[in-house]
Amino acid sequence: MSPRPERLGVGIGWRAELDLTVEGLPGVDFVEVIAENIRPPALPESLRVLRSRGTPVIPHGVSLGVGSAEPPDSRRLAHLAACAQALESPLVSEHLAFVRAGDLESGHLLPVPRTREALSVIVQNVRQAQESLPVPLALENVAALFGWPEDELTEAEFLRELVERTGVGLLIDVANLYTSQVNLGLDARAALDTLPLEELAYVHVAGGYAHDGVWHDTHTTVIPPDVLDLLAELSARAEPPGVLLEWDADYPSDAVLAAELDRIRAASYVR
């Protein structure tokens, strides 16, 4: 199964607080829903309305933990699979992140150690997830506040090799690339040069703010110009099948959200 959809367009993250807004916003071609926030046997009415219109809905997981030492939890995989089937989704997305060790939950999407040993474990975890899902899987780069001292590969190199060994798709979050650039000094444009963008499933963009020299990827503000510039850089290298706006709290007016979708469309040339 190819992880790259033919076309998704411009989308927005569906949240219960935005359900009627998302239904009425012009220019919403697809949506993404946090998988842990829904129950497949009883989908929110708003998602059912969107599906009845033919709007693709992508389940986006936040707790699978393919970056952990243990294999993915079978119950979480079953839930992702059920979400994809109930929503007739073209793919499922998750994060390349460390989220738990045994019964200890990190409470945050932590970067994985980018070592050869960790890569071998994650390859097996990704393959197990792929075998358990009825649709292709795409993995997202996370917003890193630190790097592991034993890292042997850059994030882009790690993702490239993971894609080559598993065929998993890429969900590139340009806001997360920007976060890593500001907080860790990693060149986001150099990452774009290395990432296997031919396997791009779709793209995330979001806003945030700087505080005491640290960039916080909060999903609560309009998209900064530097993040839009990164989106344009990515789009110049490989036209993304879709670009999605994330907004998770402090929700603005419908007019502001519509304007953000217009800015995304202009920066990415997604039609």
Image (cartoon, grey):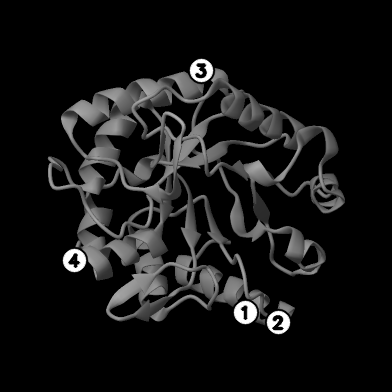
Q: CA distance from mark 3 to mark 1?
A: 40 Å
The label nearer to you, 3 versus 1, is: 3
| Residue hosting label 4 | 185
Q: CA distance from mark 2 to mark 4?
A: 35 Å
Res. 24 visible in picture: yes
Residue found at x 64% / y 42%: 36
Which residue type does callout 4 highlight?
A: Gly
Circle nearer the N terminus (1, 4): 4
Asked whether the beta carbons under mark 3 and mark 2 sit within 8 Å of each other, the answer is no
Residue found at x 47% / y 25%: 72
Check disc 1 and report its element: helix, strand or loop: helix
The label nearer to you, 3 versus 4, is: 4
Front-most of residues 59 and 163: 59
Question: x%, y% of residue 163?
Answer: 33, 33
| Residue hosting label 2 | 255
Residue found at x 35% / y 20%: 124
